[in-house]
Amino acid sequence: MVEVDFEQYPVQYLKMVGPRRFALLKRLGIRTVKDLLYHFPREYQERTVKPSYACAHGEQVTLQGRVVGVTELSPRSGLWITRVKVQEPTGHFFAVWFNQRYIKKLFTAGSHVQVTGKIERRFGEIQLLVADYELLEGEDPVPQEGIVPIYPLTEQLTQRLMRSLMRLALDEWTPRINDFLPPGVRQKFFLPELPSALCQIHFPATEKEAIRARKRFIFEELFLLQLVLALRRRQITRKLKPHRYHDHEDLVGRFLSSLPFTLTPGQQRAWEEIKADMDAPWPMNRLLQGDVGAGKTVVSTLALLRAVGSGLQGALMVPTEILAEQHHLTLSRSLASLGIKVGLLSGSMRKKERERLLAGLACGEIPLVVGTHALIQEKVQFKSLALVVIDEQHRFGVRQRAILQYKGHCPDVLVMTATPIPRTLALTLYGDLEVSTISELPPGRRPVQTYAFPSSRLPDVYGLVRREVEKGHQAYVVCPLVEESEKLDVRAAVELMEELSRGPLAGCRLGLLHGRLKPAEKEDVMEAFRTGQIQVLVTTSVVEVGVDVPNATAMVILDAERFGLAQLHQLRGRVGRGKAQSYCVLVSDSTTEEARYRLEAMTSTTDGFVLAEKDLQLRGPGELTGTRQSGLPEFKIADLVRDWRALQLARQEAVALIKKDPELKAPEHRLLARELRLRFGGKAGYLDIG
């Protein structure tokens, strides 16, 4: 069989596709014949033609007949109704369209038509509100009955046209398409060959055929991604790093001795895994995850100290400036006794400050730097960057990780996530990384008691806050999130603080924290809260990450439905850091199903791993990670929640295949290597094969 490049063949050269239709198809991301054939149906409809008299009101049906006449009405401004009278052998009905005036020109008296839609019986008439239609004369080769595919469309493209194009492309191209999945893989998982699968997913004869074809494309999508990740892991182990760690100054030991606690078993285990990676001849590429408050920062600090103690440099990259400032302050304080200089690089620095810092990094005078994405800009050069710690929080992706890796000669990379990530995302977004998990919290901590109340219970809620303050503890009150306006967030916070100081929390020492304060002002507020001068901190969500005040035992989150599940869990993680019982109250009047689901999830568990899975089910992977930013490919047909088992099988198969044929040079893998280059080749820092 001759190999034909259907991946590159422009769809506009297909019969029935001119420049205008090509422009419409491009809106759906369809540029080639392969794009067209991989534009899968979103659902199927079982269409059996029946007479209109046998149809019930509200029933979804398919009817056929001969056009008798067409009328057009406009009962009010902006509304046009087109009614086509259709004669059947046993009676007649009216096919109805709203605001589609072009329909009038398509139907002429005497033409045969098939229409699908919802039946309405009123005033003695049978009407069909048309969702889809077919003109039965002409060259339309699509079957009219049975299982009919329904496609995602854009304006001015019809289901009828899409089905015709699919049939045309399948007839012309499937005899020339080669399957890139190795025969052994297809046989092992009972998957149809690519040409058959394409025919069956678009025009299945039975429901079983459609399911079988979908299974093939779901596995294909997941398998190709897992192959890429397995190749990437292998590429990393082929590189040799030039640096070695020795920590002559014993910074790690001195730091551990200065801590007022010992590492938990989980922290110790994670640290041993990281140390082993750092001692390996190839670069570390590891994900460190754990629940809120599990002590990930301490473990990452040990790794950074090991680099600095070896005369090398370390960098900590975080997603926001506020977080960069918090980490910089924490590290500067905790490492001051060791005499380590910590630099801060952010986008808002003054020019001279920035130049001084860049010079210090380039000559090695600054051994440790904290920064935002500014760290991956071209001007930033290091003398001896050996370790990069990325506090990811689902906001950096593979591409950003790759850029920062190139700043050093194969530096070790440790990625931390702010909250646990769902296992499916660990195998996709972070599938090129080894994983260390800190599963337990430090000893002595009690689970935070969480409640959800309507705003009518606010007097009780603030009563709880006052009682905690009277016990000598502290509290947070988190303002509602005002979307896309930091200015409005600030105003809401100021107004809330004034209202609380005059009313339910009068007499308490209140402080205010928001994103528009200058770094020095923020630090003054946080220092006052840490030392107990501020008893109740009124704050926007800037307090979400990195704030550690063990004496804080109460957290009130207003309009809690405006926050995502991961964000709510992060906020709750600001309390429960000491040995006293802590409380989190979610205040919400929302009655939406999604809000109720979130609040129930928060009140039912404090386990971040459980909540991560619930968040994935609620929002889907795209929204959870910010797909385009994350580097995670957008799946056309696979679903990480539904297809978790298929993902595991795909990963196992991919790992085994790369172990057996690491360069995909075997004859049966030639087409597979080509498909990987076509789909991923260099994109998002994933692949560099062939």
Image (cartoon, rainbow, N blue to C red):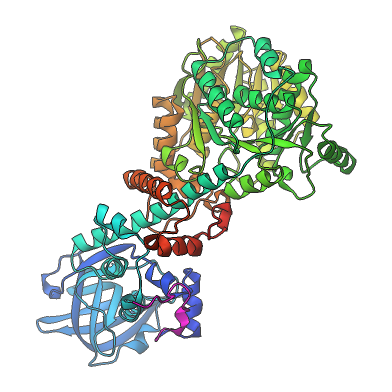
The chief SS type of the magenta part is loop
Quadrant in the picture for residue 666 = bottom left
Q: Residue at x 35, y 73 (%)?
A: 177
Q: Residue at x 11, y 70 (%)?
A: 54
Q: Which residue is at the front of the view, 309 or 12?
A: 309
Q: Which residues are magenta?
A: 1-15
Q: Magenta stretch containing residue 2, yes or no? A: yes
Total number of numbered discs in the rendering: 0
- Residue 557 percent coordinates (x, y): 54, 29
| Quadrant of the snapshot with the N terminus | bottom left
The answer to whether 344 appears left or right of 163 in the picture is: right
**Residue reaching furthest to the right:** 352
Q: Which residue is at the front of the view, 325 or 235?
A: 235
Q: Magenta stretch containing residue 628, yes or no? A: no
Q: Is residue 2 visible?
A: yes
The answer to whether 247 appears left or right of 147 in the picture is: right
The answer to whether 160 appears left or right of 533 in the picture is: left
- Residue 495 percent coordinates (x, y): 67, 32
**197 versus 426 height, above or below:** below
**36 versus 347 height, above or below:** below
- Residue 460 percent coordinates (x, y): 50, 18
**106 versus 530 height, above or below:** below
**688 versus 605 height, above or below:** below
The answer to whether 363 appears left or right of 462 in the picture is: right
Quadrant in the picture for residue 252 = top right
- Residue 472 percent coordinates (x, y): 62, 7
Q: Is residue 559 visible?
A: no
Quadrant in the picture for residue 99 = bottom left
